[in-house]
Amino acid sequence: MEPTQGDYIVIKAKDQGVQVIGLTRGQDTKFHHTEKLDKNEILIVQFTDHTSAVKIRGKASVMTKHGMIETDQ
């Protein structure tokens, strides 16, 4: 089996309690992993065969190969 070569994103929390939720790939999309970040913590996330999307709740900076995105909350 080939290792997954999915894209990475970097999430930096700008406030306490930023939630990062991984969503599954497949016919039924489900939550499969959650992390809670404190202010200034950084999480590096890779999309894989199992992870198709990431949901972010709270104030954070998200860095991708397409640029930087700031949440409004």
Image (cartoon, helix red, strand yellow):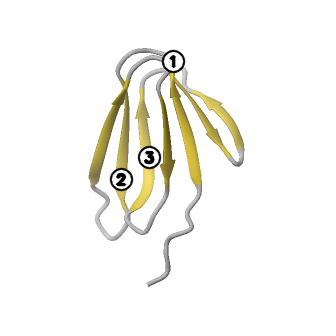
Mark 1 lies on residue? 14
Image point (52%, 34%), residue name:
11
Task: Indicate the secondary structure of the residue bearing disc 3.
Answer: strand
Mark 3 lies on residue? 54
Q: CA distance from mark 1 to mark 3?
A: 17 Å
Q: Which mark is residue 63?
A: none
Label 1 vs 3, first from the N-terminus: 1
Image point (29%, 47%), residue name:
33
Task: Indicate the secondary structure of the residue bearing disc 1.
Answer: loop
Residue 32 % position (x, y): 27, 53
The correct choice, above or below, for 33 with respect to 50 in the image is: above
Image point (28%, 64%), residue name:
28
At label 1, the amino acid type is: Lys
Residue 19 % position (x, y): 36, 31
Mark 2 lies on residue? 23
Residue 17 % position (x, y): 35, 20
At label 2, the amino acid type is: Leu
Q: CA distance from mark 2 to mark 3?
A: 6 Å
The correct choice, above or below, for 52 with respect to 43 in the image is: below
Residue 6 % position (x, y): 55, 63
The correct choice, above or below, for 19 with respect to 33 in the image is: above
Q: Could you tell me if the residues under marks 2 and 3 are in contact, i.e. CB atoms within 8 Å?
A: yes
